[in-house]
Image (cartoon, rainbow, N blue to C red):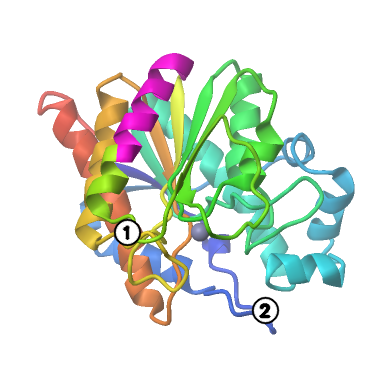
Amino acid sequence: MIPLVHHPDYVAPAPARSTYQWNKNGLIRDLLQEEGGLIDWHRPDPVPLPWLEAVHDPDYVAEVLEARVPREKERRLGFPVTAEVARRARMVPGGTYLAARLALSNRFAANSAGGSHHALADTGAGFCVFNDLAIAAVQLEAEGIRTLIVDCDVHQGDGTAALTAGRTGIATYSIHAAKNFPVRKARSTLDVPLPDETGDDVYLDTLQATLAPLLDEFAPDLILYQAGVDPFGGDRLGRLSLTQHGLDRREALIATLAMSRGLPLASTVGGGYGPDALEIARRHVRAILVLGRTFSALRGPDRKA
Ligand SMILES: [Zn+2]
Protein backbone atom coordinates (compact mmCIF):
# COMPACT_ATOMS: atom_id res chain seq x y z
CA MET A 1 0.00 0.00 0.00
CA ILE A 2 1.04 3.60 -0.60
CA PRO A 3 0.72 5.92 2.44
CA LEU A 4 -1.05 8.99 1.06
CA VAL A 5 -1.86 12.22 2.88
CA HIS A 6 -5.00 14.13 1.97
CA HIS A 7 -7.43 16.48 3.70
CA PRO A 8 -10.80 17.80 2.50
CA ASP A 9 -9.49 21.34 3.14
CA TYR A 10 -6.99 20.82 0.29
CA VAL A 11 -9.94 21.20 -2.06
CA ALA A 12 -10.62 24.90 -1.52
CA PRO A 13 -13.27 26.59 -3.67
CA ALA A 14 -11.73 28.89 -6.28
CA PRO A 15 -11.70 32.51 -5.14
CA ALA A 16 -12.92 35.12 -7.63
CA ARG A 17 -10.20 36.68 -9.85
CA SER A 18 -8.18 33.45 -9.88
CA THR A 19 -6.70 31.59 -12.81
CA TYR A 20 -5.15 28.87 -10.65
CA GLN A 21 -6.64 25.41 -11.12
CA TRP A 22 -8.29 24.93 -7.75
CA ASN A 23 -10.00 21.68 -8.63
CA LYS A 24 -6.65 19.92 -9.24
CA ASN A 25 -6.53 18.53 -5.69
CA GLY A 26 -10.09 17.22 -5.86
CA LEU A 27 -9.30 15.43 -9.12
CA ILE A 28 -6.10 13.97 -7.65
CA ARG A 29 -8.16 12.63 -4.72
CA ASP A 30 -10.78 11.15 -7.08
CA LEU A 31 -8.18 9.45 -9.26
CA LEU A 32 -6.40 7.99 -6.22
CA GLN A 33 -9.73 6.70 -4.88
CA GLU A 34 -10.05 4.72 -8.13
CA GLU A 35 -6.89 2.84 -7.08
CA GLY A 36 -8.89 1.30 -4.22
CA GLY A 37 -6.92 -0.74 -1.70
CA LEU A 38 -3.55 0.35 -3.09
CA ILE A 39 -3.86 3.65 -1.21
CA ASP A 40 -3.53 3.96 2.57
CA TRP A 41 -5.20 7.30 3.37
CA HIS A 42 -3.96 9.62 6.13
CA ARG A 43 -5.37 12.96 7.29
CA PRO A 44 -3.03 15.72 8.57
CA ASP A 45 -3.54 18.30 11.30
CA PRO A 46 -3.21 22.00 10.50
CA VAL A 47 0.37 23.08 11.05
CA PRO A 48 0.98 24.69 14.50
CA LEU A 49 1.41 28.47 14.44
CA PRO A 50 4.99 28.38 15.81
CA TRP A 51 6.03 26.14 12.88
CA LEU A 52 4.70 28.71 10.41
CA GLU A 53 6.43 31.51 12.28
CA ALA A 54 9.72 29.58 12.36
CA VAL A 55 9.89 30.07 8.58
CA HIS A 56 7.63 33.00 7.66
CA ASP A 57 7.38 36.51 9.12
CA PRO A 58 4.74 36.55 11.87
CA ASP A 59 3.16 39.61 10.21
CA TYR A 60 2.70 37.74 6.92
CA VAL A 61 1.39 34.66 8.74
CA ALA A 62 -1.22 36.85 10.45
CA GLU A 63 -2.17 38.48 7.13
CA VAL A 64 -2.86 35.06 5.64
CA LEU A 65 -4.65 33.48 8.60
CA GLU A 66 -6.86 36.55 8.97
CA ALA A 67 -7.43 36.70 5.18
CA ARG A 68 -6.19 40.28 4.89
CA VAL A 69 -3.19 39.89 2.57
CA PRO A 70 -2.39 43.23 0.87
CA ARG A 71 -3.36 43.51 -2.78
CA GLU A 72 0.26 43.72 -4.04
CA LYS A 73 1.14 40.45 -2.30
CA GLU A 74 -2.00 38.82 -3.71
CA ARG A 75 -0.88 39.90 -7.17
CA ARG A 76 2.50 38.28 -6.61
CA LEU A 77 0.76 35.20 -5.25
CA GLY A 78 -1.64 34.93 -8.18
CA PHE A 79 -4.95 34.79 -6.31
CA PRO A 80 -6.79 36.45 -3.41
CA VAL A 81 -6.46 34.87 0.04
CA THR A 82 -9.92 34.03 1.38
CA ALA A 83 -10.69 32.21 4.64
CA GLU A 84 -10.84 28.91 2.68
CA VAL A 85 -7.50 29.58 0.99
CA ALA A 86 -6.01 30.39 4.41
CA ARG A 87 -7.33 27.14 5.91
CA ARG A 88 -5.89 25.19 2.99
CA ALA A 89 -2.53 27.00 3.30
CA ARG A 90 -2.27 25.92 6.93
CA MET A 91 -3.31 22.32 6.25
CA VAL A 92 -0.94 21.58 3.34
CA PRO A 93 2.34 22.01 5.34
CA GLY A 94 0.82 19.77 8.02
CA GLY A 95 0.36 17.23 5.23
CA THR A 96 3.94 17.49 4.01
CA TYR A 97 5.20 17.04 7.57
CA LEU A 98 2.91 14.02 8.07
CA ALA A 99 4.13 12.52 4.77
CA ALA A 100 7.71 12.94 6.02
CA ARG A 101 6.87 11.21 9.30
CA LEU A 102 5.09 8.39 7.44
CA ALA A 103 8.07 8.01 5.12
CA LEU A 104 10.42 7.67 8.09
CA SER A 105 8.45 4.62 9.23
CA ASN A 106 7.27 3.27 5.81
CA ARG A 107 10.15 4.39 3.54
CA PHE A 108 7.77 6.20 1.17
CA ALA A 109 4.73 8.42 1.58
CA ALA A 110 3.13 11.11 -0.56
CA ASN A 111 1.30 14.33 0.17
CA SER A 112 -1.44 14.84 -2.43
CA ALA A 113 -0.80 18.62 -2.34
CA GLY A 114 2.14 20.89 -1.48
CA GLY A 115 5.41 21.68 -3.18
CA SER A 116 4.81 25.41 -2.62
CA HIS A 117 8.43 26.27 -3.32
CA HIS A 118 8.11 29.95 -4.32
CA ALA A 119 6.67 31.20 -1.00
CA LEU A 120 9.09 33.59 0.76
CA ALA A 121 9.41 34.82 4.35
CA ASP A 122 7.14 37.84 4.04
CA THR A 123 5.02 37.07 0.98
CA GLY A 124 3.59 34.33 -1.14
CA ALA A 125 4.53 34.09 -4.82
CA GLY A 126 3.73 32.04 -7.92
CA PHE A 127 0.60 30.31 -6.47
CA CYS A 128 2.45 29.43 -3.23
CA VAL A 129 1.10 30.82 0.08
CA PHE A 130 3.23 29.06 2.72
CA ASN A 131 6.34 27.03 1.90
CA ASP A 132 5.36 23.55 3.08
CA LEU A 133 8.76 22.08 2.12
CA ALA A 134 10.71 24.58 4.24
CA ILE A 135 8.22 24.41 7.13
CA ALA A 136 8.41 20.62 7.29
CA ALA A 137 12.20 20.52 6.90
CA VAL A 138 12.78 23.16 9.61
CA GLN A 139 10.54 21.27 12.03
CA LEU A 140 12.28 17.99 11.18
CA GLU A 141 15.65 19.66 11.77
CA ALA A 142 14.44 20.66 15.25
CA GLU A 143 13.65 16.99 15.80
CA GLY A 144 17.18 16.00 14.75
CA ILE A 145 16.39 14.82 11.22
CA ARG A 146 18.55 15.94 8.30
CA THR A 147 16.57 16.62 5.15
CA LEU A 148 17.59 17.01 1.53
CA ILE A 149 14.88 18.81 -0.44
CA VAL A 150 14.98 17.61 -4.05
CA ASP A 151 13.04 19.94 -6.34
CA CYS A 152 12.37 18.72 -9.89
CA ASP A 153 9.76 21.33 -10.78
CA VAL A 154 10.59 23.16 -14.04
CA HIS A 155 10.86 26.37 -11.96
CA GLN A 156 13.65 26.94 -9.46
CA GLY A 157 12.82 26.29 -5.80
CA ASP A 158 13.81 29.83 -4.91
CA GLY A 159 11.66 30.26 -1.80
CA THR A 160 12.77 26.95 -0.32
CA ALA A 161 16.44 27.80 -0.92
CA ALA A 162 16.08 31.26 0.66
CA LEU A 163 14.09 30.06 3.67
CA THR A 164 16.44 27.21 4.57
CA ALA A 165 19.80 28.85 3.72
CA GLY A 166 22.46 28.45 6.41
CA ARG A 167 20.71 25.59 8.22
CA THR A 168 23.14 22.75 8.71
CA GLY A 169 20.40 20.11 8.87
CA ILE A 170 18.84 21.04 5.52
CA ALA A 171 20.21 20.98 1.97
CA THR A 172 18.40 21.97 -1.23
CA TYR A 173 18.71 20.67 -4.78
CA SER A 174 16.89 22.24 -7.72
CA ILE A 175 16.98 21.09 -11.35
CA HIS A 176 15.03 23.51 -13.54
CA ALA A 177 14.81 25.44 -16.80
CA ALA A 178 17.42 28.23 -16.70
CA LYS A 179 15.36 30.77 -18.67
CA ASN A 180 12.27 30.66 -16.51
CA PHE A 181 10.39 32.15 -13.56
CA PRO A 182 11.71 33.30 -11.12
CA VAL A 183 13.88 35.78 -13.01
CA ARG A 184 16.06 36.34 -9.97
CA LYS A 185 17.13 32.92 -8.73
CA ALA A 186 18.07 32.13 -5.15
CA ARG A 187 21.06 29.95 -4.33
CA SER A 188 20.25 26.34 -3.50
CA THR A 189 22.88 24.03 -2.07
CA LEU A 190 23.06 22.74 -5.64
CA ASP A 191 21.34 24.33 -8.64
CA VAL A 192 21.21 22.58 -11.99
CA PRO A 193 19.89 25.01 -14.61
CA LEU A 194 19.06 23.40 -17.96
CA PRO A 195 18.55 24.85 -21.44
CA ASP A 196 15.13 24.83 -23.09
CA GLU A 197 14.17 21.58 -24.85
CA THR A 198 16.66 19.49 -22.91
CA GLY A 199 14.67 16.28 -23.50
CA ASP A 200 14.46 12.98 -21.59
CA ASP A 201 17.91 11.47 -21.97
CA VAL A 202 20.04 14.51 -21.16
CA TYR A 203 17.67 15.47 -18.32
CA LEU A 204 17.84 12.05 -16.69
CA ASP A 205 21.60 11.68 -17.16
CA THR A 206 22.14 15.13 -15.65
CA LEU A 207 19.77 14.40 -12.75
CA GLN A 208 21.61 11.22 -11.86
CA ALA A 209 25.09 12.71 -12.29
CA THR A 210 24.35 15.72 -10.06
CA LEU A 211 21.98 14.33 -7.43
CA ALA A 212 23.84 11.11 -6.57
CA PRO A 213 27.03 12.87 -5.34
CA LEU A 214 24.99 15.35 -3.27
CA LEU A 215 23.11 12.49 -1.61
CA ASP A 216 26.40 10.87 -0.68
CA GLU A 217 28.03 14.11 0.44
CA PHE A 218 25.16 15.49 2.55
CA ALA A 219 23.97 12.07 3.78
CA PRO A 220 20.45 13.09 4.79
CA ASP A 221 18.05 11.06 6.93
CA LEU A 222 15.18 11.84 4.56
CA ILE A 223 14.46 13.18 1.08
CA LEU A 224 11.59 15.64 0.63
CA TYR A 225 10.77 15.46 -3.07
CA GLN A 226 8.93 18.18 -5.00
CA ALA A 227 7.61 16.17 -7.96
CA GLY A 228 6.46 19.01 -10.20
CA VAL A 229 5.20 17.70 -13.54
CA ASP A 230 5.74 20.95 -15.43
CA PRO A 231 8.99 19.85 -17.16
CA PHE A 232 6.55 17.93 -19.41
CA GLY A 233 6.78 19.08 -23.03
CA GLY A 234 3.04 19.70 -23.31
CA ASP A 235 2.87 21.82 -20.16
CA ARG A 236 1.83 25.44 -20.60
CA LEU A 237 4.84 26.60 -18.55
CA GLY A 238 7.17 23.69 -19.28
CA ARG A 239 10.27 24.27 -21.35
CA LEU A 240 12.35 21.13 -20.88
CA SER A 241 10.38 18.97 -23.37
CA LEU A 242 10.16 15.84 -21.26
CA THR A 243 7.79 13.09 -22.41
CA GLN A 244 5.41 11.25 -20.07
CA HIS A 245 7.76 8.28 -20.30
CA GLY A 246 10.61 10.60 -19.31
CA LEU A 247 8.67 11.73 -16.23
CA ASP A 248 8.00 8.07 -15.32
CA ARG A 249 11.71 7.33 -15.65
CA ARG A 250 12.47 10.37 -13.48
CA GLU A 251 10.25 9.08 -10.62
CA ALA A 252 11.78 5.59 -10.92
CA LEU A 253 15.29 7.09 -10.84
CA ILE A 254 14.56 9.26 -7.78
CA ALA A 255 13.05 6.29 -5.93
CA THR A 256 16.00 4.07 -6.90
CA LEU A 257 18.60 6.65 -5.81
CA ALA A 258 16.84 6.87 -2.43
CA MET A 259 16.27 3.14 -1.99
CA SER A 260 19.82 2.18 -2.92
CA ARG A 261 21.00 4.32 0.00
CA GLY A 262 18.29 3.14 2.39
CA LEU A 263 16.83 6.65 2.42
CA PRO A 264 13.14 7.29 3.09
CA LEU A 265 11.39 9.70 0.73
CA ALA A 266 8.28 11.85 1.07
CA SER A 267 6.89 13.40 -2.09
CA THR A 268 4.69 16.40 -2.71
CA VAL A 269 3.04 17.48 -5.92
CA GLY A 270 4.21 20.68 -7.61
CA GLY A 271 3.69 22.61 -10.81
CA GLY A 272 1.56 21.34 -13.66
CA TYR A 273 -0.31 23.73 -15.94
CA GLY A 274 -2.65 23.54 -18.88
CA PRO A 275 -6.27 23.84 -19.95
CA ASP A 276 -7.23 20.28 -18.96
CA ALA A 277 -7.16 19.93 -15.16
CA LEU A 278 -7.89 16.21 -15.35
CA GLU A 279 -4.85 15.61 -17.55
CA ILE A 280 -2.65 17.49 -15.04
CA ALA A 281 -4.15 15.57 -12.12
CA ARG A 282 -3.48 12.28 -13.93
CA ARG A 283 0.15 13.27 -14.34
CA HIS A 284 0.50 13.98 -10.58
CA VAL A 285 -1.19 10.70 -9.66
CA ARG A 286 1.03 8.80 -12.05
CA ALA A 287 4.11 10.30 -10.35
CA ILE A 288 2.83 9.13 -6.94
CA LEU A 289 2.06 5.65 -8.27
CA VAL A 290 5.42 5.21 -10.03
CA LEU A 291 7.27 6.34 -6.89
CA GLY A 292 5.17 4.05 -4.70
CA ARG A 293 5.49 1.04 -6.98
CA THR A 294 9.25 1.49 -7.37
CA PHE A 295 9.67 1.58 -3.61
CA SER A 296 7.45 -1.51 -3.23
CA ALA A 297 9.30 -3.43 -5.94
CA LEU A 298 12.73 -2.64 -4.53
CA ARG A 299 11.63 -3.43 -1.01
CA GLY A 300 11.04 -7.06 -1.97
CA PRO A 301 8.10 -9.35 -1.34
CA ASP A 302 8.90 -10.23 2.26
CA ARG A 303 7.79 -6.95 3.81
CA LYS A 304 4.26 -5.70 4.18
CA ALA A 305 2.99 -2.21 3.21
ZN1 LIG B 1 6.62 25.03 -11.59
Q: Position of residue 283 (x, y in %)?
A: 32, 63
Q: Position of residue 12 (x, y in %)?
A: 59, 70
Identify the image quadrant of the C terminus.
top left
The structure residue drawn at horizontal position 84% and vertical position 69%, both measured from the top left corner, is 72
**Secondary structure under badge 1?**
helix
Outermost residue, front side: 195
How crowded pointer 2 is (Cα within 10 Å; few <14, some 14-19, many 20+) is rated as some
How crowded pointer 1 is (Cα within 10 Å; few <14, some 14-19, many 20+) is rated as many
Q: Is residue 265 left or right of residue 130?
A: left
Magenta residue check for 214: yes
The part of the chain drawn in magenta is 206-220
The structure residue drawn at horizontal position 67% and vertical position 22%, both measured from the top left corner, is 167
Front residue of this view, candidates 82 and 226:
226
**Residue 170 visible in image:** yes
Residue type (three-letter) at the residue carrying disc 2 = Pro
Magenta residue check for 5: no
The residue labelled by disc 2 is 15
Q: Earlier in the sequence, mark 1 or mark 2?
A: 2
**Residue 45 visible in image:** no
Outermost residue, left side: 301
Q: Is residue 20 left or right of residue 30?
A: right
Q: CA distance from mark 1 to mark 2?
A: 25 Å
The structure residue drawn at horizontal position 19% and vertical position 30%, both measured from the top left corner, is 304
Identify the image quadrant of the N terminus.
top left
The residue labelled by disc 1 is 285
Q: Are marks 1 and 2 in contact (CB under 8 Å)?
A: no
Q: Position of residue 121 (x, y in %)?
A: 78, 45
Above or below, comparing residue 269 to residue 169 in the picture: below
Residue type (three-letter) at the residue carrying disc 1 = Val
